[in-house]
Image (cartoon, grey):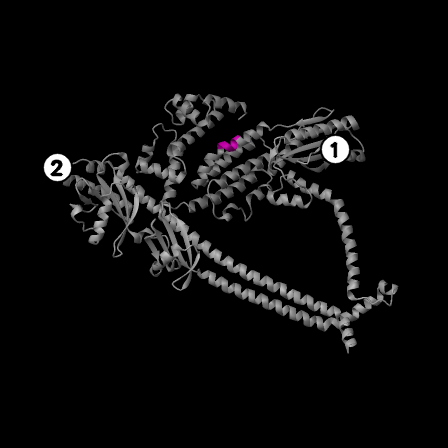
Amino acid sequence: MKRDLKTHFKEYESFYKLMRSFLIMLILPLLLVMVNYLYSHTLLRQENLNYQDAVLEQVQLATDERLQGLQRHALDLTNDATISQALEKKLDSQEDINYQLWQVSNQLKYYSASAGSLCDTLLYSSSYDCLISGSYIDFRASTGITRLGSEEMNRLVLEKLQNTRAYCQFQLVETETGERKLLLLHTMPLWSTGRAPYGTICLVIQEDTLFQGILETEEAKAGLYCLLSPEGEIAAWFGNEALLPAVSEADASTEEFQTLNGSSHTVSHKASALNGWRYLSIQPEHTMVKKLNGARNLSLLMLALVLVAGNIIGVILARRNYRPLKQLMNELRRQSMLSKANPEEVTGEFSLIERSMKEMSRSMSALENTLKEEMPRIQESVLMQLFRNAVTDYPRFQNTLQRVGILLPYEKYRVALVKRLQEGEFDQQLISMLMVKERVIQLAPKSLAYAFATVDDDSMIILLNGAGEDFEAETRRILNTVAEDMRESYDQMLWISVSEVGCGMESVSKAYYSVMQAHRQAPEGGVQYLEESDEHCAIDKALESLAAQMQNYIATGNEEGALDLLHRSLESDVRQKHAALYEAQAYCIGVMNIVTGAYRVEDPEVLTVNGEAPLKQLFLQHNTFEMETLLAELIGKVCAYVRENQQSPTAQLTAQMLDYLQQNFWDVDLTLTSVADHFCLTPSYLSSFFKSNTGETFLNYLTHLRMEKAKELMRTTNESIRDISEKVGYASANTFTRAFKNTEHITPSQYRESSQGNGE
């Protein structure tokens, strides 16, 4: 019996090994399914939280903009001369007082209209002890106010109004019965100026309109958005009122997922632009998360079932087909050379498989040797892609170089063209190039990387890569030594053309074209070090002069102006100068960078042309007209995107201001006050608005614009400094010279001389 079992197990040894393999195949995918389940669960929760954080950020930005608009509204009231003079001047006649306060009330009516429905505009006069609005005047307010709800609320608000130390402060007033009002208080004049205060501006903010129009979806109404005071009190809210009692608990906890009112919620916090104030979002689990969880669970369950079913079917088929397989293996065993050499030796299926693996190993070894022989040609082919500017993704190309055995880890690059001057047999030329390679390898220190590529029978490209300040000196030493050694030791005349040192892999193609187009030296050869041509400098300067105007056109969505500027610049800076194709490509790449960087584009599809990256397509164009067509299509898409996303009043007003300055910068009388009058704004509001939406002060922006126009005129014309100063909005040449020196740190005459000396 034992012998029968032993024979049985030996006979079916391969089958049982196959069964173990099936079990391992079953366990590993199931473990993978479990890991995937846990990871996807965490990922869905995090995506839900990210979504709620993004919505809360939109609420914060929109609400803060309204609250800051109310602060500017209060500042405008402070700067109003009619209100200030009326309240500051103390009158004895009741008739004069009534008339004076009637004027103040009319002014408040005008300002209340501009504030809209966000607040009620009130003003408390300490000189006359009265409360003023656009529709009423209450004398003797300190003895009792009936305009602000309950008596307790009237008393608390009056205490706030009589406080003379308030500077655009938001304050939350709440009674013991739960009645609450959000106020903005501002003393007239400011207490820190040392002047006696004579009034307090009070904006009673309507909480129900503070979030109006920001979120209107049913999903948003199911949750709760709150504006919290520095003390943690609810100043304003929007959404599900049933979640209000849970605000304190949610705010006190640092957990992002909390169980509130018996269900799971996400809790997000966001700091307000107001000092100490913050926003809180309590949202139920996103409905899409539940659907995705269900779809994930179903797909994972189906995957598990398929794995189990596949393994069961594999076992059944293996069991059914094992006997024919066993007969086949016996026949292979009988016919194998191993069986003939030792017919009594019992060999199994795995012995034959082992022989097959050895044969495969020998084949792979032969393939590896062949690959080693071909690797230099593969490396040269990859390098020529870099030299000929056929690379669009440099980080990925860096990985490709590493895979083929080329390591270029440093920032600085230099290209050298080595050409043998003597005529000779092919073998002699090949030996000369091999000797040059060997000499470079011997001379190069460990801190310098290199690569070689053959151009033709008697020419070779050397790519040098290094870092540090001694890179240029080190490459000069190596190349000079190679040329001298080949001439003195082997009587080989070499001509070596060496490019400038470039930074970044993007500079390699330019360096390659420069050495390929360099003029050959004397017949005895030598080393020629190239300098950057004036033409390259001119193109770079042309891009600098183009940038500001093109950015203005793109930022305002002016497609017609941008296309006209593109056409004129290509005609004057590229076509009329007969620039080489690679130089035209470099110029168009610069224009493309200006266009894509002039406006923040959230949708990556906008920055593609025909579904592909425009940079990749640019290298496929054959002339500047095709490049212009490609850039024109990109400009059209970006300008259309800008126009679609500049529908807010703030963006429209900013664009109108920038366009007005662009058209009128030459006007000597152009000032902050004149621009404010043109747009029907107060100067203080315009100054604050301009700084908030452009990042620069009004004066700095106007001065920069005038200086850029002046520099353009000095580079392109021979007009006098006096004429140029008048054309850019300065009353005299002396004023212009002082302003120019303050911004550029040189005089206009020095700038003109340096620009002409550089060939601009």
Magenta run includes residue 53? no
Image quarter of the N terminus? bottom right
The relative height of residue 362 versus residue 191 in the rendered view (above or below) is below
Q: Residue furthest front?
A: 2
Quarter assignment of residue 477:
top right
Specify the label residue 360 is tagged with: none
| Callout 2 secondary element | loop
* Picture coordinates of residue 480, whole percent (x, y): 70, 27
Residue behind mark 1: 439
| Callout 1 secondary element | helix
Left or right for 163, reference 659 = left
Q: Give the prevailing secondary structure in the magenta stretch.
A: helix
Residue behind mark 2: 92
Amino acid at circle 1: Arg
Number of dots carrying numbers: 2
Looking at the image, which is closer to me, 379 or 77?
Answer: 77
Looking at the image, which is closer to me, 682 or 389?
Answer: 682
Left or right for 334, reference 513 = right
Quarter assignment of residue 248:
bottom left
The relative height of residue 69 versus residue 530 in the rendered view (above or below) is below
Tell me which residue sits at (23%, 49%) in the image.
156
What is the distance, in whole Å, between disc 2 and disc 1 at their CAs?
Answer: 104 Å
Tell me which residue sits at (72%, 67%) in the image.
17
Q: Which residues are magenta?
A: 541-545
Give whichever of discs 2 and 1 has the lower sequence position: 2
Q: Are there few (<14), some (14-19), or many (20+) residues within 10 Å of tag 2?
A: few
